[in-house]
Image (tube, grey):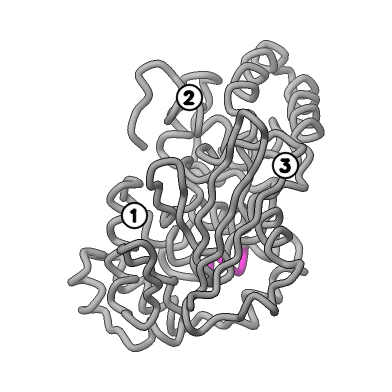
Amino acid sequence: MRDERQESWKIQVPFHLDYCLNCGQAFRWKKRGKHWFGFINDNLYRIEYDESNKTIRTLRIPGDSVRTTADYEGENRLQIERYFGLNDSLSTIRESILSNLRENGYNWFALKFEEIFSKSLGLRILRQDVWEVTVSFLLSTQTNIPALEKKLDALCRLFPENEVRYDGESFYRFPKKGTLALLCEEDYKRLGFGYRSAWLCQLVRRFSESDFHSLRTETYERKLSFLLTFPGIGYKVAHCILLFGYSVLKAFPVDIWISRWIKEVFDIEGAHDQLATWGQTAFGEYAGYAQEYIFNFCRNLAPGGREI
């Protein structure tokens, strides 16, 4: 009999499930009707959020190789709340960002940002697996979100041992480093990764779990410098890894859309590292939250929003 664990509880803080999972920070969650399906700590979850009564409902659907319900007593809710950053105080974050904008002479934009923030209220930075985040954003270079989602899905399907089936559909855990080490550059090229294939091969060869995990205790500068030593990881990708993999909330990823937005709104141009530094100065210690709210506004909420 399948070992499932279903729970529901009230969320006492602003939360928007769709924004969290559909704003360019995670690429393998799938929406089926009112439910989202995805993996947290290698367990498949079915999650829905009822906005009318502020209730989250989760169903954990483990495969054969993960822990049992008895092992998870008391952990299920904690995992969900941690993954979705539900302990982040959005009111504190909002006030900090607005204060930084005003201190840097952007009073005129503070009013606009309040509108952006209110329209995306409930969007939170996810706490994701560093390995999956690193591979995903390495492959994101010059790739839009729908194409990246397809590439990652194709990669995961190469390993049927990672399959978890539910309601007639197959879902796949993300392959570990040792699993990807079984592939060569030509294998990645057949998946459509192109020039990124060489980058991924080098990442797999050089990646050390101990190095990546030890980075958690290092400074922002040390983390950034280390990530930039990997081929294919420039400032944009490094800031994505810092924000979505290491929860460095002052990281400010700058892709072509954010750079265009900065140019349009502030008439400021520069290289990715220069614009990231500008964003951190303008928005402060929660610059990463500001970036995600702006990204979500441009992609999903602005009139005539563009595919990013």
Q: Answer above or below: position of 248 versus 154.
A: above
Q: Can residue 288 be seen in this snapshot?
A: no
To which quarter of the image does residue 34 belong?
top left
Question: Is residue 97 shown to the viewer in this render?
Answer: yes
Query: Height in image: 6 above or below 252?
Result: below
Disc 2 residue type (three-letter):
Lys
Q: Which residue type carries mark 3?
A: Lys
Q: Whole-percent x and y of residue 103?
A: 80, 23
Task: Describe the element under mark 3 as helix, strand or loop.
Answer: strand
Residue wearing tag 2: 263
Asked whether 78 or 247 is in front, the reply is 78
Q: Amino acid at mark 1?
A: Glu
Which one is closest to the eye, mark 1 or mark 3?
A: 3
Task: Please provide the residue range marked out in magenta.
Answer: 225-229
The residue that mark 3 highlights is: 10
- Alpha carbon of mark 3 to alpha carbon of mark 2: how far? 41 Å
Q: Quadrant of residue 96?
A: top right
The kind of secondary structure element at disc 2 is helix
